Amino acid sequence: WVRSAPEGRNGRGMTPETFRDAREALGLTQAAAAELLGYGHPSRISEIENGRRKPGDTVLLLLKAYRAGYRPENWPGRA
């Protein structure tokens, strides 16, 4: 998790910037992303997006699945 690493270089495939871009592309607020990814508070998403916290491998896999089209039943706006 290196701020300046190109996507994929560090083996985790996501920088703080690409994490934020993915969240925004999915139309999620920090609060909605925190709930879907299992974080207790939206500030955790802010910390990841600012490079102060590293997301776990499971969170990165979930975010990649969401980007690929997976949507759980509790997806915001899903009826």
Image: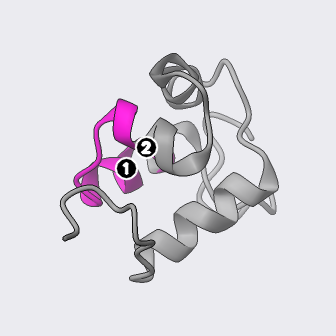
Q: Which label was assigned to residue 23?
A: 1
Residue 47, above or below 73: above
Residue 19, above or below 52: below
In the image, farthest residue toward the bottom: 69
Residue 61, above or below 58: below
In the image, farthest residue toward the front: 79
57 left or right of 53 in image: right
In the rendered structure, which amino acid carries the disc numbered 1?
Arg
Q: Residues within 10 Å of mark 2 (few under 14, many from 20)?
A: many
Q: Are marks 1 and 2 in contact (CB under 8 Å)?
A: yes
Q: Can residue 13 be seen in this snapshot?
A: yes
Write the start and end of the magenta stretch as one range: 19-32
Q: Residue at x 37, y 50 (%)?
A: 23
Q: Position of residue 57 (x, y in %)?
A: 79, 56
Is residue 24 part of the magenta span, yes or no? yes
Find numbered disc 2 in the image and state the secondary structure of the residue it sits on. Answer: helix
Q: Quadrant of the C terminus?
A: bottom left
Q: Earlier in the sequence, mark 1 or mark 2?
A: 1
Is residue 50 part of the magenta span, yes or no? no
Q: Main secondary structure of the magenta part?
A: helix
Q: Residue at x 29, y 47 (%)?
A: 28
Q: Position of residue 4 (x, y in %)?
A: 61, 38
36 left or right of 59 in image: left
The residue tagged 2 is 33
